Image: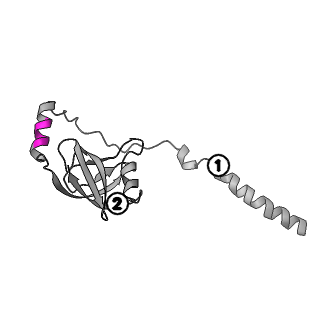
Amino acid sequence: MIQIMRNAFFLLPILALAGCDLPQLDMLKPKQETGVTPGPVVEAPEEVSEETLESAAAVDRPEAQPGSLGTTVVSLGDATQAGSWLKTPLVANTRPGKVWYNGRWAAVTLIPIEGESGSGSRMSLQAMQLLSLPLTGLTEVEVTAD
């Protein structure tokens, strides 16, 4: 009797796990059509020239003067991209700057990205390590232009 119980306790989990690999029976049924037809195709907008995009960017964000640009919330950017940089909507053109956190600062290259000034920024791994920022968190920093 004990031998039968041991075999049962040994074989039951194996049989239960073997059933996990079976296909779902309802997946084998043909799908019923809902009768929904796709809507009309929308035409693509006209192409926008490069000059129009550049002038629009210049209107949205005036050229930053040396000094404080404001604060932004940073997250880790592309860790495979080398260097010390901050991609932020606080600038209109690439320029040197500093990022301040808890009285410490790191010299970075400020790179413009699309977005409102409060929409957040992405920082390089090197700059985050220089400032001892948490790599998986969102941290508010102050940005200044040189």
Residue 132: image quadrant is: bottom left
Residue tagged 1:
21
Residue 47 placement, left or right of 35: left
**Residue 98 lies in the magenta-colored region:** no
Q: Position of residue 51 (x, y in %)?
A: 12, 32
Give, as a three-letter code, the residue at label 1.
Answer: Asp
The location of residue 82, given as percent across then percent down, is 39, 41
Find the distance from the CA under tag 1 to the CA under tag 2: 41 Å
Residue at the image position 30 percent from the left and 64 percent from the top: 103
Q: Is residue 22 left or right of residue 41?
A: right
Answer with left or right where residue 41 lies relative to residue 136. Answer: left
Say what amino acid the circle numbered 2 marks: Leu
Dominant SS of magenta comes to: helix
Q: Which mark is residue 142?
A: none
Colour mode of the rendering: one colour
Residue segment shown in magenta: 53-58
Viewer-closest of 30 and 85: 85
The quarter of the image holding the N terminus is bottom right
Q: Earlier in the sequence, mark 1 or mark 2?
A: 1
Q: Is residue 101 above or below residue 76?
A: below
Q: Residue at x 34, y 46 (%)?
A: 84
Q: Which residue: 67% across, 53% down?
A: 19
- The residue tagged 2 is 138
**Residue 57 in sight here:** yes
Count how many numbered circles sit on residues in the image: 2
